[in-house]
Amino acid sequence: MNCRLNQSKRSIASLSIIAATAFVLSSLSTSTADAQSGTRTRPTARPSAAQAGSGTRTAANAVGLQGYCPVCVIEAKQWMKGTAQISANHDGKTYLFPSEEQKQMFLANPSKYTPILGGDCVVALVEMGKRVPGSVQFAALHEGHLYLFANEKAKGMFQANKEKYAHADVALGGKCSVCRVEMNQDVDGVPEFTSLHKGMRYLFPGEKQQQMFNQNPAKYEVAK
């Protein structure tokens, strides 16, 4: 009987050591991500591949940023969870906010707060020509925009050569797609008039062209 009790105690002690080791390794992993993120806080849990970038699925839209508030990331450099009761739909995704204030800021300027390429990895788009979901665990801020990457290697490639990747989501190199279709002319758009469609940024020279695009994006979108 004493032999069995001692064996049981040793098993429990071994399990405790394993659990403690796993906790330490998990903490180290999170600390590394914190140091590289460019934000003060990081997501509290590593998302699965299905949740990364595009977010978890709902009946109509994907939940962007795995439920984290995009306004909080940009304005406060913090990863703060939103609530399903305060949400906004934009370009096929549902974004959640902790308060109505952040929601209204997002609605006033969605192109500022929406993750670049809708949360997909710009490095994968440039290097492979493919849309690959990014992860909130591999995030970076650049020129006031949030970028998500598929992995640490892709994030490092971006940081080493931002000019190559930063504007990969800008359709037609910033030329107005409406002007090209309607007038067969290349006219530069301006950031003031930006619309998002399928994760791509479309720039226009004025409000008229932007409204024409918004009313019928399928007519003016860039074929992929």
Image (tube, rainbow, N blue to C red):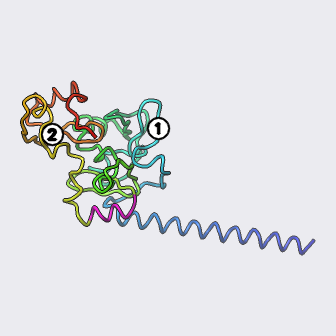
Q: Which residues are magenta?
A: 151-159
Residue 162 or 181: which is nearer the viewer?
Answer: 181
State whether residue 99 is above or below residue 144: above
Question: Measuring 21% from the left and 24% from the top, which residue is drawn there?
Answer: 215
**Secondary structure type for disc 2:** strand
Locate the N terminus by quadrant: bottom right
Mark earlier in primary sequence (2, 1) = 1
**What residue type is disc 2 on?**
Leu
Q: Residue furthest right?
A: 1
Assess disc 2: are there few (<14), some (14-19) or many (≥20) residues with their C-alpha within 10 Å of its C-alpha. many
State whether residue 51 is above or below residue 181: below
**What residue type is disc 1 on?**
Arg
Question: Measuring 34% from the left and 49% from the top, which residue is drawn there?
Answer: 130
Q: Quadrant of residue 107?
A: top left
Q: Position of residue 91 (x, y in %)?
A: 31, 35
Tell me the chief SS of the magenta region.
Answer: helix
Is residue 154 magenta-colored? yes
Residue 223 or 211: which is nearer the viewer?
Answer: 223
- Mark 2 vs mark 1: give the one in front: 2
Give the labeled residue for mark 2. 203
Q: Position of residue 194 (x, y in %)?
A: 17, 38
* CB within 8 Å, label 2 to label 1: no
**Secondary structure type for disc 1:** loop
Residue 57, which numbered label?
A: 1
Question: Measuring 29% from the left and 43% from the top, which residue is drawn there?
Answer: 114
State whether residue 18 is above or below residue 55: below
Assess disc 1: are there few (<14), some (14-19) or many (≥20) residues with their C-alpha within 10 Å of its C-alpha. some
The alpha-carbon separation of the residues under discs 2 and 1 comes to 29 Å
Q: Position of residue 185 (x, y in %)?
A: 6, 36
Locate the C terminus by quadrant: top left
Is residue 163 magenta-colored? no
